Amino acid sequence: MGFGKINIMPDSEGFYGNYGGQFVPNELKKEFQKIAETFLNCIKEKEFNDELNDLLENYAGRPSPVYYAKNLSAKYNCGIYLKREDLNHTGAHKINHSLGEALLAKRMGKSKLIAETGAGQHGVAIATAAAITGLECDIYMGEIDIVKEKPNVERMKILGANIVPVSDGTKTLKEAVDASFNAYLKEYNTAMYAIGSAVGPYPFPMIIEYFQSVIGREAREQFLKQAGKLPDCIIACVGGGSNAIGLFSGFIEDESVDIYGVEPLGRSSAAGDNAASMNFGKDGIIHGFKCKVLQDADGKITNAYSVASGLDYPGVGPKHCYLAEIGRVKYDVIDDNEAINAFYELSKAEGIIPALESSHAVAYGLKLAKTGKYKDMLINLSGRGDKDIEFVLSKFNC
């Protein structure tokens, strides 16, 4: 199958095919242009890259390993490999872009980072990056997620972040994004919006993909070294899509590698019961960019839901929409129960407790393994499950 030339970078207006762009107040367009120009200059500079790489390697603990899950592989008669982003400092892939965003903010002379968080992994990573670079940090989080993800809230407070509870709407990730963006509108002269996924108006999806591409570069090299070949397929969970776009970037032009993005089906396919915008959404505008958005018949954005707080967003990164449009990536779904079962299965089989977000990718990988279609697969284990243990034990039996 030929996909033609795949757009690695967005066009001059921030679009990947039909998706992306910049739908923001005019007062922000000049500021976003400054961010884009600073970023594009920084990534060409040895000094910036040396500082970022030093932090990634000597502070965050990169490279994260690719691990052969021998017990699951034997059970399913399939080579199952895990990219261990759960072993990064702060416990997830979020530290990759958080360190980059903090360095970018410092280069621009900003004194504060403003961020949103759902599961708290991005919040912890941003609070950590702010601490190591000497920046202030305001983190907006829905009240439901504050209760659900208590361990991460406590970590953010210890790290010195100011946690701002959000009580609007569903009190989860979408409203946290709304609140943080509104706060940024009032402070953009002195603060930088440190977005938590590959979403938002240009240039944020481009910036996040660049900083997360370290996952794909490492994974490709590591898998070739271990297995002597590329994986037959790669799999990652997709909410906004930062961990997935990072992994995918390393394999996107390898036509022999099938690529799967896994969305949360939640309780069902009914509106308000899931956060599968790639599967059930329609083209629309959310938070300043065009993507697939969960909407009702009148075009109103509907509530998103997932057992995994980091996946319950009603939109998705524009690059993912583009990759689906050209047929390069298949986006499928896993429901709450399947994710919980995978959470326990990986824990008991390999001694690795995954984040509920990552459990969606694990569940889909195990489902694919049962089909016998693939000899070897690589699953992105985007985060560890410490944050989810109390919630899972209170809601689901072992």
Image (cartoon, rainbow, N blue to C red):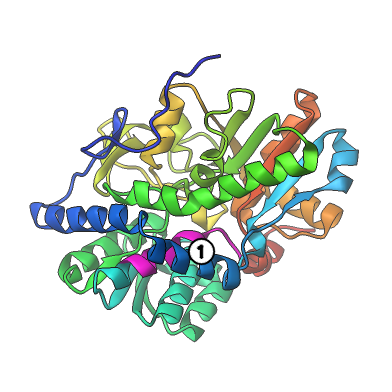
Vertical placement of residue 284 versus 355, above or below: above
Q: Give the residue drawn at x 42%, y 27%.
A: 6
Please tell me in which quadrant of the rendered image residue 387 appears: bottom right
In this view of the protein, can residue 169 be seen by the observer? no
Decide which of 2, 277 is in the foreground and name it: 2
Please tell me in which quadrant of the rendered image residue 92 appears: bottom right
> Residue 249, percent across and down?
51, 40
Q: Give the residue drawn at x 61%, y 62%.
A: 62
- Quadrant (top left/top right/bottom left/bottom right) for the C terminus: bottom right
Vertical placement of residue 79 versus 159, above or below: above
Q: Which residues are magenta?
A: 90-104
- Quadrant (top left/top right/bottom left/bottom right) for the N terminus: top right
> Residue 97, percent across and down?
45, 59
Give the labeled residue for mark 1.
53
User: Magenta stretch: residue 281 in it?
Assistant: no
Decide which of 381, 315 is in the foreground and name it: 381
Q: Give the residue drawn at x 25%, y 68%.
A: 108
Q: Give the residue drawn at x 75%, y 38%.
A: 366
Q: Main secondary structure of the magenta part?
A: helix
- Mark 1 belongs to which amino acid? Asn
Residue furthest toward the top?
Answer: 1
Decide which of 209, 24 is in the foreground and name it: 209
Q: Secondary structure at mark 1?
A: helix
Instruction: Indicate left or right for 178 with 154 as reference.
Output: left
Instruction: Indicate left or right for 80 with 262 as reference.
Output: right
